[in-house]
Image: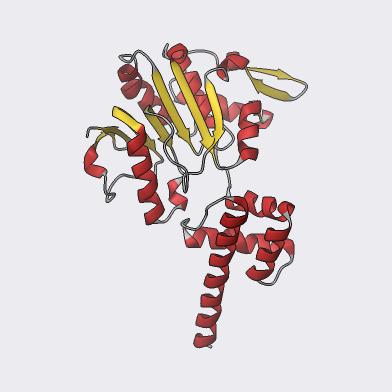
Amino acid sequence: MKEAEERDAELEKIETALLLEGIYQRYGYDFRDYSSSSVGRRIRHRMRLEGLDDISSLLRNVLHDSDAFRRLLGDLIIPVTELFRDPEMFLAFRRNVAPELRKLPFVRIWHAGCSTGEEVYSLVVLLHEEGLLDKSRIYATDISEEALQRARDGILPIDRMQQYTRNYQAAGGTGEFSSYYASERGIVMLKPFLRERIVFARHNLATDSSFNEFHVVFCRNVMIYFNSELSNRVHGLFYDSLAAGGFLVLGGRESLAFTPIEDRYETWNDTHRIYRKIL
């Protein structure tokens, strides 16, 4: 019995590798170095929904049917985001980083893995209230074009507005949160001026290179899905993308500890994973 289970596990590993390689070769999305346990759960979930018995059948469908691929992609890229998510981090950024950004003539920010844009817009509101927005440009990127389109639209779920308001207040908001959006016929849309300083673009952290020099790089709760090899690659990408003295902001479960470049940063706020490039 144990030998049969080991053979099945090895076969699943081979099929998964072929599926991820096929996705990369056919569609250009690279999940080959994502956490195997996370990817495996999502693949099995899609198999159940599609009524398939094995990964090879899923591979065949994905390669020959772009709709099947988009369904699987929706499982592999699961956006978990909200306005002012982890408000204490935004409060720390407001207090500890914004004063440093005021010293610069112009501020370039890269928000990598922006998903549907809620955290990007949170940052824009913060920059506006700190008098930094007019001299800032925010580049918001994601692997998913569908998520990027939702981000460009700037439409919020009306049933989340009370939670978003509480988050905004906890993040040190200095105004009325309702001044940043308009509500009509059950649709909540962010004010157009919040979108004017954002450039949305597709970027794949697994394969694409740096495209500018930035004073801040946000990448929160993205690398928890990567294996160590891909995480190190992405950390190198961010390091190369940051100007001297630039800030890197990671998610609460992410850290520079034990990475090849941890000694090239100083910890600016350990609790909220804010680091500053020193070398």
Q: Position of residue 2 (x, y in %)?
A: 50, 86
Please give the name of the residue rendered at 50% of the width and 87% of the height, measured from the top-left corner: 3
Between 166 and 189, the one lying in front of the other is: 189
- The residue at the far right in this view is 185
Report the label total. Answer: 0
Between 92 and 162, the one lying in front of the other is: 92
Q: Position of residue 61 (x, y in %)?
A: 71, 62
Please give the name of the residue rendered at 37% of the width and 41% of the height, measured from the top-left corner: 237
Confirm whether residue 27 shows in the render: yes
Q: Is residue 189 left or right of residue 132?
A: right
Please give the name of the residue rendered at 39% of the width and 19% of the height, measured from the top-left corner: 107
Confirm whether residue 82 shows in the render: no
Between 277 and 170, the one lying in front of the other is: 277
Q: Quadrant of the N terminus?
A: bottom right
Please give the name of the residue rendered at 47% of the width and 52% of the height, measured from the top-left corner: 225
How has the structure been colored for display? secondary structure
Q: Position of residue 238 (x, y in %)?
A: 37, 38
Q: Quadrant of residue 220?
A: top left
Q: Position of residue 165 (x, y in %)?
A: 56, 24
> Height in image: 189 above or below 253?
above
Q: Is residue 126 left or right of residue 80?
A: left
Q: Quadrant of the C terminus?
A: top left
Between 82 and 169, the one lying in front of the other is: 82
